[in-house]
Image (cartoon, coloured by chain):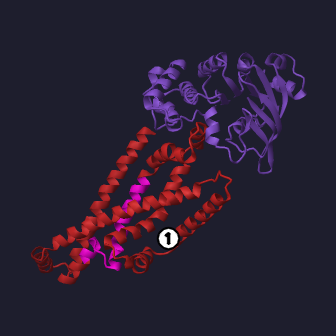
Amino acid sequence: MFTMDRTMAFFEIFINGRYYETVLDGLYNTILLSLIATGVGLAIGLVVAVSQILKVESDNRFIKVFVKVFKFITKVYVDIIRGTPAVVQISFLWLVVLGPLDLPRVLVGGIAFGINSGAYMAEVIRGGIVAIDKGQMEAGRSLGLSYGQTMMVIILPQAIKQMLPALVNEFIVLIKETAIIGFIGGMDLMKAADIMIGNTYNFEIPLIMVAIIYLMLTSILTWFMRGIERRLNKQG
Amino acid sequence: MIRIQDLRKSFGELEVLKGITDTIFQGEVVVVIGPSGSGKSTFLRCINKMEDATSGDILLDGNSILRSDVDINKVRQKVGMVFQHFNLFPHMSVLDNITLAPIKVKGMSKDEAQKVAFDLLDKVGLRDKANEYPSRLSGGQKQRIAIARALAMNPEVMLFDEPTSALDPEMVKEVLQVILDLANEGMTMVIVTHEMGFAREVGTRLMFMDGGVIVENGNPKDVFDNPQNDRTKLFFSKVL
């Protein structure tokens, strides 16, 4: 396996064939993919979390039924996403749902992973919201603010602070999970390793190389997350 | 004026309010006392629909607030509430706590709202705390800010839900003084409290509740000095 000759041969091809560009390309896509997925996941997670917490105040029958149906849909969504492998979901979304739309793969991948991540973020966000003392909602409402206003101005700003470490953690999970984007032919770090393996017949170096890059990415984020946690604890 | 007609409230099987009928006139300071579990807080919280009444009616200035087509947010602008645990918004400065609702709900300009806020801060004696965050305030200061926050909406009625129960003893007085000042200005108030001396001093009317009903209702001095009902006598024998 690890012979000097093999390794030298790999790096010769790596440099001459400009495969470092492939790696940078993959890195760029991995980060972009994770960012898009986090954004989409946050938006979905927020809607799902709020829908699960929401209490209907109106007596309007249409609104009541609508909210009930919406709650049901979001619950089914969460159950499906949590109960099936991500790779199946991504493939399904790519091949069946989003594929025919002829969008860039990184965007489709981002949306697909976002849909996956949203189910997990919903739980983080829901937990963050219900952890806020219910007196906060009462105080906001007693002043004449609507449920939505109180949520946006009073509850969520406090909840987001609580959720931040868990959300950064979800971003770290996404950076690693997006490695399965290759299943739908997308380009990312893992795919870059794949390409190098195919062209150099060297398995060990490309895999170790991308593993180190993944590790560096997640380490930086973990360090960042600890920093946030420390700051929050100080404020607490 | 608030008219309460045969107000009932159940939590599941448990009926907490068993038919409350009363009228609170403008300028009255109604002090509600009674043993814990008597329904006094629930009664108070029904008045601004923090709790949904199970049956009966509540009329504010002649209009029912329980009808489904009533905009409850409009009603709550007229009814200020002060909570036992203050419930200040910890992520906002004192000034922002007070100006939030006037700006968001009443559409006041920021300058105007801040002017109102500073006037109120003067009133509760905390102008110098305008830019502090709630976590840096003592309990008594927090509650005075909470009162200022409720007053910023210029309500017709103020509801106080055990405003001093969560305070250290040495801070009770400063909060009661603010409430007393309000009473002297003629603010209509309903106050749930365990402070008997204060109840006697500030109340224009005393309501003794037990078991979800109003047992005794009248001039505080009369009720304190000459309680008619055995339950009232028993309660006073324990707390006075």
Identify which residue, A156 or A216, lies in the foreground: A156
Q: Which residue is tagged 1?
A: A81
The quarter of the image holding the N terminus of chain B is: top right
- Regarding residue A121, the answer to whether it shows in the image is no
Circle 1 residues within 10 Å: few <14, some 14–19, many ≥20: some
Element marked by disc 1: helix
- Say which residue appears at 63% left-offset and 19% top-offset: B182
Q: Horizontal placement of B194 versus A99: left or right?
A: right
* Residue type, numbered disc 1: Ile
> Is A77 in the magenta?
no
In the image, residue A92 above or below residue B31 = below
In the image, residue A193 above or below residue A215 = below
- Say which residue appears at 49% left-offset and 75% top-offset: A84
Whole-percent x and y of residue B94? Answer: 47, 30
- Say which residue appears at 62% left-offset and 39% top-offset: B74
- Say which residue appears at 90% left-offset and 26% top-offset: B229
Magenta residues, dominant SS class? helix
Whole-percent x and y of residue A26? Answer: 25, 70
How many labels sit on residues? 1
Whole-percent x and y of residue A112? Answer: 41, 70
> Is A179 in the magenta?
yes
Identify which residue, A209 or A105, lies in the foreground: A105
| Chain whose colour in the figure is purple | B
- Regarding residue A206, the answer to whether it shows in the image is yes
Q: Quadrant of residue A212?
A: bottom left
In the image, residue A211 above or below residue B152 = below
Q: Quadrant of residue A146?
A: top right
Q: Which span of residues is magenta-colored?
A: A165-193
| Chain whose colour in the figure is red | A
